[in-house]
Amino acid sequence: LDASLPYEAGDDAARRRVEFYSEVMERAAAIPGVRTVGAANGFPLVGGAADGAFLIMSSADEKIDMDKFSELLKDPARGGYANFLVVDGSYFDAMNIPVLSGRGFRDGDMPDAQHVGVISASLAKTKWPGESPIGKIIEYGNMDGDLRPFTVVGVVGDVRDASLAAEPQPTFYAYLPQRMHAAQSMYVVMQTTGDAASVMASARAIVRELRPDVPAEVRTLETIVSTSVSDRKFVLLLVGIFGSAAL
């Protein structure tokens, strides 16, 4: 479901946006036949993922002069490049993305705690070949206006983001409750064993009830990839809430 909403800056606006997405997901999870609901600010083959550069830090307390950030990136031992996605704690389950080592996000990863990140297997292989990336510290510069560094807590499977034919792109995942300002737009994905048409209608109704002014579009994964998924036991429904809302 795609919906364009006016942007509003500030902490309160960011919290209201996340509250809106959370309400959509909570209601979507109650639709008959829906197994898992997750959310991200980008989606494979659709777009939305920001790409950017990061630095590998010696510790979470290391201080970086942001005016020298670009210069430091030139050091191949410290600089890196990856897609930057913000997701909720259920996104990996909803997308059938396996956790290969470490862990995913959990409720204990509070906004005022050390900010944590999960990386894709291709990023782990690129930057830490032959060693575990768990516990490594990454500073992503000014991707979302928040300069707090991330501690890597997990590695997940790769996703073919650009196209089915392209190699997976290295990806860094941040946790939505910790990086609310990056959630200027979100996709909600529902994995379901129910009738797709019925679930899609219910998803539209949820957004219409919460925000009658927001136009809604729901797409199946089959539509997105333009190939048959009839042999699967579930259907993924994509719900995108675009544009940061002034809720």
Image: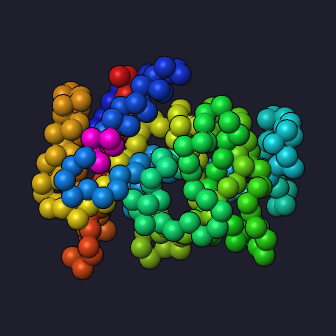
Residue 70 sits in quarter: top right
Instruction: Answer whether residue 14 is magenta in the image.
Output: no
- Residue placed at 81% from the left, 34% from the top? 67
- Residue placed at 13% from the left, 48% from the top? 201
Most extreme residue toward the front, as rendered? 108
* Residue range corresponding to the magenta coloring: 25-29
Q: Is residue 215 visible?
A: no
- Residue placed at 16% from the left, 46% from the top? 202
For the residue pair 134 and 128, the one nearer the viewer reads as 134
Q: Is residue 17 visible?
A: yes
In this picture, residue 47 sits left or right of residue 128: left
Q: How is the image coloured?
A: rainbow
> Residue 192 location, x and y as percent?
26, 61
In this picture, residue 170 sits left or right of residue 59: left
Instruction: Answer whether residue 26 is magenta in the image.
Output: yes
Residue 240 sits in quarter: top left
> Residue 128 location, x and y as percent?
77, 67
- Residue placed at 19% from the left, 53% from the top? 32
Is residue 143 placed above or below 131 in the rendered structure?
above
For the residue pair 203 and 244, the one nearer the viewer reads as 203
In this figure, what is the number of numbered marks? Answer: 0
> Residue 109 location, x and y as percent?
61, 42
> Residue 99 location, x and y as percent?
56, 66
> Which quarter of the rendering shows the C terminus?
top left
In this picture, residue 168 sits left or right of residue 163: right
Is residue 147 placed above or below 74 in the rendered structure?
above
Is residue 110 placed above or below 221 in the rendered structure?
above
Residue 178 sits in quarter: top right
The secondary structure making up most of the magenta span is helix
